[in-house]
Image (cartoon, grey):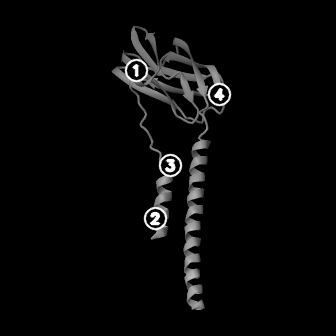
Amino acid sequence: MRIGLILVILLSLAPFSSAGQYCHEDNCFTNRGYINLNEEDLYVYYNSLFTIGENWFVVFHVTGTDNDYDVDLSFEDGNSKSLTLPGGSSNYTDSVSFSGSTFASEKFDFNLHLTITQSQGGEVVANSTFKIDINKPSDDDMFYLWGGMTVFWVAIGAYVLYLSSQFRELNKKVERIEK
């Protein structure tokens, strides 16, 4: 019974995490860019803050296009991704994601180059540069320290209760022997 109670207490102190859904709506992003592609509208949505350890998205929304376009995103350190925006579609949305392990250190005003070319012919239609900040989140050490210390002291308390019950039983046995 006591072991079950201790187990319940320890499990209730364990940190729970929930995986949040990534939002691809335009109101979820801090920045919005507009590019005119030969009379066609392309909107680029992105957050200006890349937090290390979290996925980072760039979302493209084309209102209508007759041509296929190749989109190349490249950071100034060489990390890059590309995608194709197909022609013949209206209100087409696509995205590119960079994993949270893309960067390991903080950088500010880091350049993200966007190059859009026509798939047929390779003609550069648009070039743009976005500036983002790469942020390293604060450590969660204090959270885990407090959690670990709580488990430690609960274990010490449980051991003290166990020892006191053993001493009571031993004391009762000694009293019976003395009588």
Residue type at numbered disc 1: His
What SS does tag 2 mark?
helix
- Say whether marks 4 and 1 touch (CB < 8 Å): no
Q: Are marks 3 and 4 in contact (CB under 8 Å)?
A: no
Residue type at tag 3: Pro
Q: Earlier in the sequence, mark 1 or mark 2?
A: 2
Helix, strand or loop at label 3? It is: loop
**Residue at the disc numbered 4:** 106
Cα separation between marks 4 and 1: 29 Å
For residue 28, above or below residue 18: above
Q: CA distance from mark 3 to mark 4?
A: 27 Å
Instruction: Give x and y (percent) for residue 67.
Output: 41, 16
Q: Nearer the viewer's eye, disc 2 or disc 4?
A: 2
Cβ atoms at labels 2 and 3 below 8 Å apart: no
Residue denoted by label 2 = 5
For image coordinates 55% across by 59% down, the residue present is 154
Q: What amino acid is found at the position of numbered circle 4 in the picture? A: Glu
Kindly indicate the quadrant of the structure image that contains residue 157: bottom right
Residue under numbered circle 3: 15
Distance from the alpha carbon under mark 3 to that under mark 1: 38 Å
Label 1 sits on residue = 61
